Amino acid sequence: MNDALQQPAVAARDITKQYVNGTFTALQDVSVDIHEGEVVAFIGPSGCGKTTMLRLISGLELPTRGKLATFGQPINGPGPDRGMIFQAYTSFPWLTAKKNIEYGMKIMGVPKAERAKTADEFLKLVHLDKFADSYPNSLSGGMKQRVAIARTLAQNPRIILMDEPFGALDAQVRWEMQEMMIEVIEREKKTVVVVTHDIEEAIYLADRIIFFTRNPGRIKEDIPLEFKKGQRFLRKEEMFDQDGYAQLERKLFAMMREEIVAADAA
């Protein structure tokens, strides 16, 4: 068996990230493994370094100290094994939804017919097949984010990295997008790391939650979502009825309050 297949999707060892010539420490001594096929949420108070950790995994930034690898290979920059979805809408306004999805594949040298077929498949997956020829300025915020998700998936990365992907959406569209993301995850079997400030969203999307402390960010607790019993719920309301959900939500709110109070007292 290929050794890479036995390696964690992401392996972080003693990661420290500093800025301003070492005078500001965003992350300190963070070690975590994320396994292939897992959905992991990073949460914690504002400024705890969770987005910094996501950017380190993406290769957009490099750690000051420590080792970081995907599938056994050191991260030295962005790579095709990782796809990033940002909070801001990143569609090219001069391209249709379908052409936006094809764009990354075109850069990768995928033949035209294959690009078109793949784009059609992912438009259908994110429920935008009727809007293939629409331009971003005619799409809602939720639709634009679906285009971004489809474009990332079409490039077939092994790891999907999501930075507050639904943070700019209104409440109704947000939960619709969360449910759509579960549908996508179940079909595509990707490893997903998502940063969110929303505790309910983290519980719904994730198999594990990594809770970061206030600055400098350390791992306060690594929490498997045992109440789900290995399930992912296509309908969000199904989660609320599960034994253990309310207790976990209460625990996470208490942890968040503890970190906020500690930060205010510092």
Image: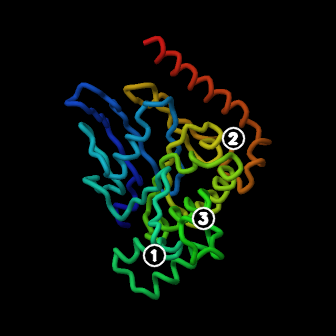
Q: CA distance from mark 2 to mark 3?
A: 37 Å
Q: Which residue is mark 2?
A: 227
In three-dimensional space, the C-alpha distance between marks 1 and 2, rounded to whole angstroms, equals: 39 Å
Q: Amino acid at mark 3?
A: Leu
Q: Looking at the picture, does residue 101 appear above or below residue 186?
A: below
Q: Position of residue 252 (x, y in %)?
A: 61, 29
* Residue 236 % position (x, y): 73, 49
Q: Nearer the viewer, mark 1 or mark 2?
A: 1
Residue occupying the point 61% across, 67% down: 126
Q: Quadrant of residue 198?
A: top right
Reading the image, the residue beneath label 1 is: 102
Rendered view: 229 above or below 108: above
In the displayed structure, does residue 192 sit left or right of residue 63?
right
Query: Dividing the picture into quarters, in which one does residue 70 lie?
Result: bottom left
The residue wearing badge 3 is 139
- Say which element carries label 3: loop
Please state the horizontal and vertical placement of residue 49, each as a whole percent of the image: 40, 34
Mark 3, Cα crowd under 10 Å, few <14 / some 14-19 / many 20+, is some
Mark 1: few/some/many CA within 10 Å (<14, 14-19, 20+): many
**Chain-order first, disc 1 or disc 2:** 1
Q: Is residue 84 left or right of residue 140?
A: left
Instruction: Report the residue at 47% width, 64% height from top.
Output: 91
Q: Residue furthest top?
A: 265
Please provide percent x and percent y for residue 177.
64, 55
Separation of residues labelled 1 and 3 (CA atoms):
18 Å
